[in-house]
Each structure stands twice: as C-alpha cells, then as structure tokens.
Image (cartoon, rainbow, N blue to C red):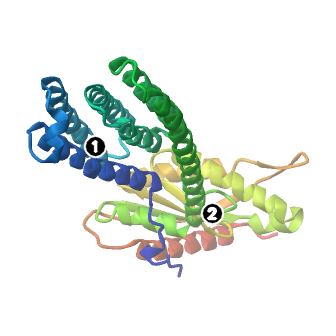
C-alpha cells in the first residue's frame, strides 16, 4: 500500500514583495498622518507653528496640504489592502506625485515669506520616492522639488544648497533602494525555485507527492477520481539501453501525460515508473475518456536518441469518489493501487506463452 506524506509537507507560499509593500504603506500612513495633523494645527493658529503660517497665502497652502495629504492617505490605505493588485504601481505613483507637490509648495512659500531655512524639509519627499520607485523615482522627485522651489521662491539663496544636498540624497537613497529591490527579487526567485523543487519531481518536472496531496486537499468533499499508472516494459528499456534512456523515457511520458490531461486534472510522479493522475469532479465516463487518451499517449514510440525508439505499455488502477464520500487521497490511492496490480496480473495472464 502506498501512502502520501502528511498535509503539512506542502510548502506555504510567502511573498516578500507583498510584505514590503504593506510595510511601505504602513510607514506612509503613520508619517503622513503626523504631517497632516501638524500642518492642520499650525494652519488653525494653534501652538508654536502658528507664527510660520500667519499670512493668508500660507494658511491657504497649508489647508490645501491637509486635503492632499488626506487623499494620499486614502491611496496608501488602498495600496496596503491590495499590495499585489495591478493598480498598486499607480496608487504608489499617485502618492509620490501628491506628496512631492504638497511639500514643495509649503516649503517654497515658507521660504519666500520668512527667513527660516526650510529647504531640508524637501528631503523626505526624495527619500520616499526612492523607497517607492528606486533611483528613477528619487531623481524625478529631486528634479520636481528643485524646479518647483526655483519657480515658487525665485532668487532664494537656498536654491544652491537644495540642489547639492538634494542630488546627493537622491543618488544615495535611490541606489540603495535599487540594490535592495534587486536583492529582494533575487531572494524571491530563489524562494520560488526552492518551492518548485520541494513540490515537483526533479526528473520529469511533474508534481510530487506533497504537491498532489495539497491539490487533493483543495478538492475535498467533491467528486474525485484517482488513476495509478505503472509502465510496462520500463525495466527492459533500462536493462537494454541504460538508465539515461530510461530517464528520457520517463521525462517524455510525463510530458505526454500533461498534454493528454489538459485542464481536466493533474498528473504527478510517485517514483520509479509510477505516476498518479488526479481528476476532480470526474465520474466513470470522464475517467474512461481520460484513460483512453492516456493509453494512446503512452503507447506511441519514444525516441531515446541515436535513432533508437522504444515502446512501453501501461497498467492502470482507478478509484472513484462520489461527492458525499469522505475518502481521502491515501484511501483512494490504495484502492487504485490494488486495481493497478489486478490489471497488471490480468495482462500477464493474457500474454501468450513463448
């Protein structure tokens, strides 16, 4: 009897990019909310910051900034809820544009109306753009803040320092963010490769036992068919042509099973020359049609190189589960296993004596 591993053997998907995006949006919500409250308090004439927004123009710009920061927070909330959405890049870019425009307007007007040094407040806009959009975003934010400051505060003696320091911040934060992004993507690719290795057979590329078990679990409580296949003549191929030829044969049979099934189910390799086919929502008629396709696919000659071709057959056992039956994959596999051995015995007995 063949048993499959515990269900915990199936790997758990873990997306580092999704977690990073949620972290970015959480930080944006916290930082921007602090800026929104501080700006609103100052615009309302409360506290020490009220002196910096004494003019009607400055007060108007601050209240407008409160509104735009609120809009950005809405975008951040949407991005945090759906970090893998196809709209996320647009939500992130929208926040960068709004934040850069808002802080540039407030800083430039404050610089024009007071003698206080305000240009360092533009640095967060560049740094945040770097976190979101790497070196390209950082340089674009630097260009936007510099141009906006020059237009809104013409003749300011602070422009030179803004250009020098802003460019340095853009390059440093942008290159570091780009390097981190490449590193995370490389780690994610490695994780996906390891996950594939853990859930797929190395020789045929078909799902392995853990993958098959997880697939069956997702279809619990529904009609289900299990086909256990064993190749007839595989040992002779190994003995006569070598193990390399046997490996080529297994790889080709795996590819043919995948094509023969199409979208009807999932084929996996248990080991050796045994394959397991899972057919969700299948009855006896569907299973019979699939078996015909499988037999036709397997019995075609297989090229093993050097102009040589081999032909193998297949013995199969079938187990069917109606929708109201609690039988799990282990039970169905054992039933199909018994049927496969009966089929193999019957074929052996029907073979004419030499």
Which residue, given by chain and number where applicable, does mark 1 sit on?
76
From the image, which quarter does the C terminus lie in? bottom right
Say whether residue 267 is left or right of residue 98: right
Q: Position of residue 267 (x, y in %)?
A: 54, 57
Q: Secondary structure at mark 2?
A: loop
Q: Position of residue 141 (x, y in %)?
A: 44, 31
Q: How far apart in space, not on screen, are marks 2 and 1 (Cα)?
A: 42 Å
Q: Can you see residue 227?
A: yes
How many residues crowd mark 1 within 10 Å: few (<14), some (14–19), many (20+)? Answer: many
Q: Is residue 254 above or below residue 231?
A: above
Label located before the other in sequence (2 or 1):
1
Q: Residue at x 67, y 54 (%)?
A: 253
Q: Is residue 228 above or below residue 172?
A: below
State the residue in front, 79 or 335: 79
Q: Residue at x 24, y 66 (%)?
A: 324
Disc sitting over residue 201 in the figure: 2
Q: Quadrant of residue 224?
A: bottom left
Q: Residue at x 42, y 53 (%)?
A: 20
Q: Secondary structure at mark 1?
A: helix
Label 2 close to label 1 by CB (< 8 Å)? no
State the residue in front, 82 or 71: 71
Q: Residue at x 54, y 53 (%)?
A: 184
Q: Is residue 118 above or below residue 202?
A: above
Q: Position of residue 68 (x, y in %)?
A: 21, 32
Q: Position of residue 191 (x, y in %)?
A: 56, 60
């Amino acid at each position: 009897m063949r048993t499959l591993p515990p269900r915990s053997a199936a790997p758990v998907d873990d997306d580092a990019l999704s977690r990073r995006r949620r972290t970015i949006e959480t930080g944006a919500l916290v930082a921007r909310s602090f800026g929104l409250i501080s700006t609103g308090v100052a615009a309302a004439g409360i506290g020490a910051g009220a002196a910096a927004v004494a003019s009607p123009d400055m007060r108007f710009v601050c209240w407008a900034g409160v509104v735009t920061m609120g809009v950005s927070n809405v975008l951040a909330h949407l991005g945090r809820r759906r970090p893998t959405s196809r709209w996320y890049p647009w939500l992130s870019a929208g926040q960068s544009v709004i934040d850069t425009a808002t802080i540039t307007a407030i800083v430039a007007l404050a610089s024009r109306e007071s003698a206080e040094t305000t240009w360092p407040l533009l640095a967060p806009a560049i740094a945040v753009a770097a976190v979101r959009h790497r070196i390209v975003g950082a340089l674009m934010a630097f260009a936007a803040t510099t141009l906006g400051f020059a237009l809104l505060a013409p003749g300011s003696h602070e422009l030179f320092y803004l250009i020098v320091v802003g460019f340095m911040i853009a390059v440093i934060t942008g290159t570091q963010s780009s390097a981190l992004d490449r590193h995370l993507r490389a780690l994610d690719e490695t994780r996906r490769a390891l996950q594939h290795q853990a859930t797929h057979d190395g020789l045929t590329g078909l799902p392995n036992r853990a993958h098959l078990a997880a697939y069956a679990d997702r279809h619990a409580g529904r009609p289900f068919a299990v086909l256990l296949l064993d190749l007839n003549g595989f040992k002779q191929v190994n003995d006569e042509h070598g193990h390399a030829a046997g490996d080529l044969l297994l790889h080709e049979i795996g590819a043919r099973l995948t094509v023969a099934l199409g979208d009807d189910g999932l084929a996996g390799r248990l080991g050796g020359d045994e394959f397991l086919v899972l057919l969700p929502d299948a009855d006896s008629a569907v299973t019979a049609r699939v078996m015909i396709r499988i037999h036709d696919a397997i019995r075609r000659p297989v090229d093993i190189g050097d102009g040589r071709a081999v032909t193998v057959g297949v013995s199969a056992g079938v187990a069917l589960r109606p929708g109201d039956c609690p039988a799990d994959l282990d039970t169905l596999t054992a039933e199909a296993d018994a049927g496969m051995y009966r089929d193999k015995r019957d074929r052996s007995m029907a073979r004419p004596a030499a």
